[in-house]
């Protein structure tokens, strides 16, 4: 099958892209914690995660869907863990006959940091090693934000492993690329602030004021990650993002 590089601007992915930033955007809890959306999150959180040894790290992962369905692996963005994926996206994929693999990148969530230097290339090697460990010979790959860069490197280094490449909130890097705002870099690398404080500082850069007025209950439709990300992992990931 000829490889297709798909750049998707789909609404169902919007939540997945914004979750790491907005999940702790407000000190208040969702007004309807028992809403159908939050119930779907709870069901996914209850799925036990597995762990496999890949090189110098132990990678935590989860599978969703039927094992004989078409495989797809989802690669998270900067500072995100696998429990930040939208349950609506995961549900849409599994109902479309996909066997979904989600996982924590090196140094995030329940995946260990190891001893090797953080880099896009290393993250791509980790992902390729995970596919080998799970005996997934060929798969669709969805990457967003920093994960989209990892997905590109994975495809370039291992074209035989990738059926279709799906990129979101991405870029091709290089001198003509628009770099991340220095204000954002300063916020996300500020270890003196809590995750919630960093998120609150970033929100004005993401949506116009009228969007918040039109969506006052947006917190009801966002996952609330339980996994943590070390300051070291966020700092190293930001350095990688800046130099793409």
Image (cartoon, rainbow, N blue to C red):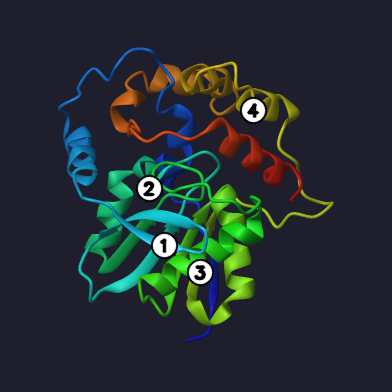
**Do the CB atoms of the residues marked 2 and 4 lie less than 8 Å apart?**
no
Give how far apart the Cα atoms at labels 1 and 3 are. Answer: 12 Å
> How would you rate the neighbour count of disc 2 (Cα within 10 Å): few for under 14, some for 14-19, many for 20 or more?
some
The answer to whether residue 78 of the structure is visible from this angle is yes
Q: Which residue is mark 4?
A: 189
> How would you rate the neighbour count of disc 3 (Cα within 10 Å): few for under 14, some for 14-19, many for 20 or more?
many
Give how far apart the Cα atoms at labels 3 and 4 are. Answer: 28 Å
In this rendering, the answer to whether 67 lies above or below 215 is: below
In this view, which residue lies farthest toward the bottom?
1
* Earlier sequence position, callout 4 versus callout 1: 1
Give how far apart the Cα atoms at labels 4 and 1 are. Answer: 29 Å
* Earlier sequence position, callout 3 versus callout 4: 3
* Earlier sequence position, callout 2 versus callout 4: 2
Q: Secondary structure at mark 3?
A: helix
Please name the residue shown 47% across and 36% down the image.
18
Q: Which residue is mark 3?
A: 128
């Amino acid at each position: 099958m000829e490889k297709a590089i798909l750049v998707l601007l789909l609404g169902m992915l919007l939540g997945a892209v914004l979750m790491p930033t907005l999940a702790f955007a407000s000190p208040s809890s969702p007004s309807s914690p028992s809403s159908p959306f939050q119930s779907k999150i709870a069901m996914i959180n209850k799925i036990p995660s597995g762990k496999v040894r890949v090189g110098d790290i132990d990678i935590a992962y989860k599978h969703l869907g039927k094992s004989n369905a078409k495989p797809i692996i989802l690669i998270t963005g900067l500072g995100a863990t696998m429990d930040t994926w939208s349950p609506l996206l995961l549900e849409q994929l599994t109902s479309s006959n996909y066997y979904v693999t989600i996982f924590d990148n090196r140094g995030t969530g329940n995946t260990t940091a190891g001893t090797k230097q953080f880099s896009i290339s290393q993250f791509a090697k980790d992902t390729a090693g995970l596919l080998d460990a799970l005996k997934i010979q060929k798969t669709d790959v969805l990457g967003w934000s920093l994960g989209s860069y990892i997905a590109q490197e994975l495809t370039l280094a291992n074209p035989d492993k990738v059926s279709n490449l799906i990129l979101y909130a991405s870029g091709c890097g290089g001198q003509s690329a628009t770099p991340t705002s220095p204000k954002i870099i300063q916020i996300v690398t500020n270890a003196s602030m809590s995750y919630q404080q960093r998120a609150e500082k970033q929100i004005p850069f993401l949506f116009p004021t009228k969007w918040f007025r039109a969506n006052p209950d947006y917190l009801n439709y966002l996952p609330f990650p339980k996994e943590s990300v070390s300051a070291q992992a966020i700092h190293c990931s930001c350095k990688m993002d800046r130099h793409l």
